[in-house]
C-alpha cells in the first residue's frame, strides 16, 4: 500500500486563492518531499522538509510537518493558472533512506 | 546539464513484442530509479541502482521485466514479452548520494509513454 496519501484527491480554485493539500504517511521518516507534475511531464521537486523541522517556506509555498500525526501540508498562496498540476508527497522510510515512496497525488486546477 | 534523458518518448507496440526503454541520468548522480505510473496504481518504484549495481528490484512486477545499468551514464528497462497491462508511463529518475540524513532530491526524466496493443 502507499506510504503517503494525499487529500483531497482533486481541488479546484480560482486564481488568487490559496490551495492547501495534505499528506499522511504511515512509518517513521527522515524527510518528506513535495513534487509537482504537469500533465504529460515528469515530476519536479518543489521542497524538502526534514523530520526535525516543523515548517519551511519557498516562495509562495509553505510546507508543514507534524511527525506526531504523521502528516504534512502544502500551502500554495495566491495561486495562478500556471500552478495547475498534480502534487505528490514522497517520503523515505527510516530503515531505508535510499528510496522514496510517493503518495497518490492531488490534482489541482486553478481557473483564471 | 540537460537533465535526465529518456528515449523513446512514445512507444506503441503489439502484444508479445520486446520493448526497451532507455535512460541517461544526470552526470555525477550515483542513484538511478525506474518508476511506472498508471491511473490505477499511481507511481510505483520498479527498481533502483546505486553506482550501477541493482539494489532493490522488489517492485519489478514479473520476470518479463529486466533492467540493466552497464555504466554510470546509461540504463535500460526491458519488457519481454510485452502485454497490454504493461501500458503505462515509465519514468527514470536520478539523484546524488545522501547529503545528510534522509533521501536526496530525485530528478525525473520526461517519461516514456508505452502502449501495448
Image: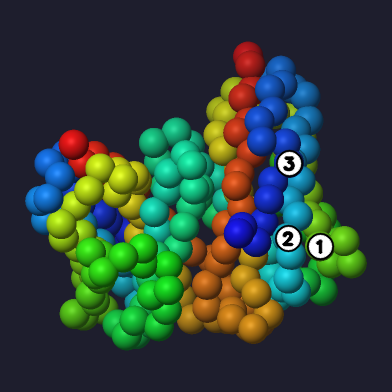
The crowd level at tag 1 (other Cα within 10 Å; few <14, some 14-19, many 20+) is: some
What x and y, as percent, mark residue A27?
73, 71
Q: Quadrant of residue B54?
A: bottom left
Could you tell me if the residues under marks 3 and 1 are in contact, i.e. CB atoms within 8 Å? no
Q: Nearer the viewer, residue B9 or A24?
A: A24
Circle 1 is placed at which residue position? A70
Is disc 1 placed on a helix, strand or loop? loop
Q: Earlier in the sequence, mark 2 or mark 1?
A: 2
**Left of B23 or right of it: where is B61?**
right
Precedes in sequence: disc 3 or disc 1: 3
Q: Is residue A67 left or right of residue A83?
A: right
What residue sits right under mark 3 in the picture? A7
Label 2, on which residue? A25
Q: Nearer the viewer, residue B8 or A27?
A: A27
User: How many numbered markers are drawn?
Assistant: 3
Left or right: A13 with respect to B83? Answer: right
Of residues B36 and A49, which is closer to you in this image? B36
Pinpoint the chain carrying mark 2: A
Of pointers 3 and 2, the one earlier in the residue sequence: 3
Q: Secondary structure at mark 3?
A: strand
Name the residue located 43 percent from the left edge and 44 percent from the top edge: B38
Amino acid at each position: 500500500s502507499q506510504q503517503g496519501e494525499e487529500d483531497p484527491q482533486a481541488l479546484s480554485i480560482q486564481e488568487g486563492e490559496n490551495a492547501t493539500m495534505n499528506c499522511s504517511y504511515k512509518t517513521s521518516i527522515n524527510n518528506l518531499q513535495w513534487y509537482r507534475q504537469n500533465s504529460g511531464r515528469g515530476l519536479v521537486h518543489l521542497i524538502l522538509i526534514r523530520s526535525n523541522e516543523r515548517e519551511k517556506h519557498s516562495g509562495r509555498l509553505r510546507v508543514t510537518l507534524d511527525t506526531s500525526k504523521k502528516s504534512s501540508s502544502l500551502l500554495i498562496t495566491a495561486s495562478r493558472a500556471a500552478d495547475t498540476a498534480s502534487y505528490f508527497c514522497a517520503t523515505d522510510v527510516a530503515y531505508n533512506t535510499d528510496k522514496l515512496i510517493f503518495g497518490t497525488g492531488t490534482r489541482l486546477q486553478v481557473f483564471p | 546539464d540537460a537533465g535526465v534523458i529518456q528515449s523513446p518518448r512514445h512507444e506503441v507496440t503489439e502484444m508479445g513484442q520486446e520493448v526497451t526503454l532507455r535512460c541517461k541520468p544526470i552526470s555525477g548522480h550515483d542513484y538511478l530509479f525506474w518508476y511506472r505510473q498508471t491511473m490505477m496504481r499511481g507511481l510505483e518504484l520498479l527498481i533502483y541502482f546505486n553506482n550501477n549495481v541493482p539494489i532493490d528490484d522488489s517492485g519489478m512486477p514479473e520476470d518479463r521485466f529486466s533492467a540493466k545499468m552497464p555504466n554510470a551514464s546509461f540504463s535500460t528497462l526491458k519488457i519481454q514479452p510485452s502485454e497490454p497491462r504493461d501500458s503505462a508511463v515509465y519514468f527514470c529518475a536520478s539523484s546524488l548520494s545522501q547529503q545528510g540524513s534522509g533521501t536526496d532530491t530525485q530528478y525525473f526524466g520526461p517519461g516514456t509513454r508505452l502502449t501495448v496493443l
